Image (cartoon, helix red, strand yellow):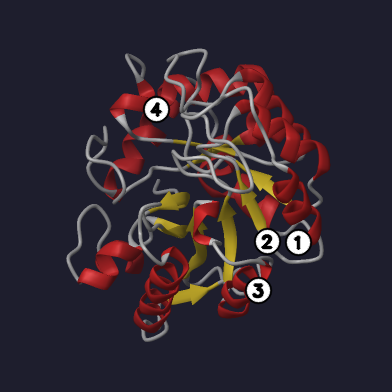
Amino acid sequence: MNIPVFDLHCDTPMNIKKRKFNHIRLTHLKSSVFAGAIFAHFVYPKEKEPFDAGLRLVLSTINYLKKKEEINILYELNKIDDNKTNIILGVEGGHIFDKGFTQFETLYELGVRVYTLTWNNSNRFAHSAFDDDKKGLTKKGREFIRSIKNYDVIIDLSHSSTKTVLDVCEICENRVIASHSCIRKLNPFIRNIDDSGTKAIAEKDGVVGINFSKKHLGKYNVNDHINYLYDYIGIKGISIGSDFDGITDPVLKCPEGYKKIADRLRRDGYKEKEIEKIFFRNFIRVLKKI
């Protein structure tokens, strides 16, 4: 039985712009393998005009996807089309906002609905795990989180420091996820999320998407990280966030590999309804939360 996946983090937009596809191809988006995906738009922090570069990238994705009948861009997060592949537009890294809140509003008007607060670098809003795991939201970051409470958006805490995760979960009124993270208790890679972070996100009724990078997984596999989350926060907090098209070391080479995870989960004793929750229903629950 094929169970579709709603993948919480794919860096496919850069490939769309170049028309040079890698892990995810249009044929994958047309097939039953996808319920949907978050397409993350990333520009490097050293970009001279990061917002302008990010804006061009978002526009190129929209122009490409809007011509595809099989794609539904989710401008309203709870308006899911079960007959199409649902794509959510996201931006990765608060460094893109270099000139103020109007830049957020510009992207929101275009349809960007997921905001990954940091990348590997800290920014004016928050600290990243790589920079300082014990420092969290800045004053401007707290102002930003409070200012978007009435917007239909998701705050993504992958890459964020543990303190940032806890700070956001304490004050944020929006949906909260960690889109593409593995478990630090299994692999002490600083980019992985620790138990206090996963618990805080679960208490906000959010989810953690497991990353497919060998560097993040360590000596364990995707299913091991899923099993750990199952034991620690329960089935409702688990999702898939492959980081396809953004990593060079995926344990699964393309979306057809999702079924290998499902087969292993069945062997581990998971029921079909539980696999459906991990693959897409948990995140759809988050989307439908108003």
Residue shown at the point (52%, 43%) measured from the top left: 179
Which is in the foreground here, disc 2 or disc 1?
1
Q: What residue type is labelled 2?
A: Val
* Figure quadrant of the C terminus: bottom right
Instruction: Give the mark, 1 or 4, whose residue is nearer the N terminus.
Output: 1
Res 287 quadrant in image: bottom right
Instruction: Give the mark, 4 or 2, whose residue is nearer the N terminus.
Output: 2
Task: Give the left or right position of residue 16, taking residue 75 as reference.
Answer: left
Q: Crowding at label 2, few (<14), some or many (≥20) Cα neighbours within 10 Å? A: many
Q: How far apart are marks 1 and 4 (CA)?
A: 33 Å
> Looking at the picture, does residue 288 appear above or below residue 54?
above
Residue receiving disc 3: 102
Question: Decide: marks 3, 2 in contact (CB < 8 A)?
Answer: no
Q: How far apart are marks 3 and 4 (CA)?
A: 39 Å
Question: Decide: marks 1, 4 in contact (CB < 8 A)?
Answer: no
> Looking at the picture, does residue 189 appear above or below residue 236?
above
Question: Decide: marks 2, 1 in contact (CB < 8 A)?
Answer: yes
Instruction: Give the mark, 2 or 1, whose residue is nearer the N terminus.
Output: 1
Which is in the foreground here, disc 3 or disc 4?
3
Disc number placed over residue 222 in the picture, else none: 4
Q: What residue type is labelled 3?
A: Thr
The x, y position of residue 204, in whole percent, is 77, 39
Q: Which amino acid does label 4 sit on?
A: Val
Which is in the foreground here, disc 4 or disc 2?
2
Element class at badge 3? helix
* Residue 108 seen: yes
Task: Give the left or right position of residue 43, taking residue 238 as reference.
Answer: left
Res 259 quadrant in image: top left
